[in-house]
Image (cartoon, rainbow, N blue to C red):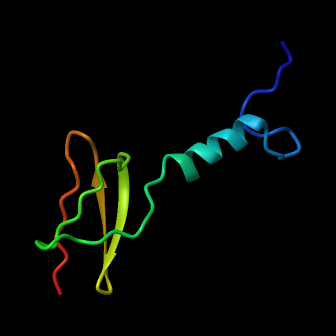
């Protein structure tokens, strides 16, 4: 058919599909924010997307995975 495939044109410029996918992955499907813990030191983010998370609290940082089947549970101790 002669139709080019992929997300970039032959000259390396992004196609509209690349730009849409980039917006989905880097904006719409991201869980960002600053959250506060409750009186027990817990935070719940019910709208979190599945994926890897970087959590920083009191100068400590941890990376962990969150899925619907196995919600992220993490303890950061000082």
| Residue at the spot 43% in from the left edge and 65% down from the top edge | 33
11 or 32, nearer to the observer: 32
The one of 28 and 8 positioned closer to us in this rendering: 28
Report the front residue among 78 and 46.
46
Q: Would you identify the image quadrant in which residue 59 lies?
A: bottom left
Left or right: 5, with 47 as reference point: right
Above or below: residue 28 compared with residue 5: below
| Image quarter hosting the C terminus | bottom left
Q: Residue furthest left?
A: 40
In which quadrant is the N terminus drawn?
A: top right
Q: Give the residue furthest to the right.
A: 11
- Image coords of residue 19 (percent x, y): 71, 43
What is the x, y in percent for residue 48? Answer: 35, 50
Q: Is residue 45 left or right of residue 31?
A: left
Which residue is located at x 58 percent, y 43 percent? 24
Question: Would you say 64 lies left or right of 13 here?
Answer: left
- Which residue occupies the extreme top position in the image? 1
How many marks can you see?
Answer: 0
In the displayed structure, 60 sits above or below 4; it is below
Give percent across and percent down for residue 6: 72, 33
């Amino acid at each position: 058919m002669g139709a080019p495939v992929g997300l970039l044109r032959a000259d390396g410029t992004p196609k509209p599909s690349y730009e849409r996918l980039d917006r989905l992955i880097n904006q719409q499907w991201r869980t960002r924010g600053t959250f506060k813990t409750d009186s027990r030191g817990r935070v719940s983010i019910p709208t979190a997307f599945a994926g890897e998370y970087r959590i920083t609290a009191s100068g400590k940082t941890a990376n962990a995975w969150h899925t619907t089947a196995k919600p992220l549970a993490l303890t950061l101790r000082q």
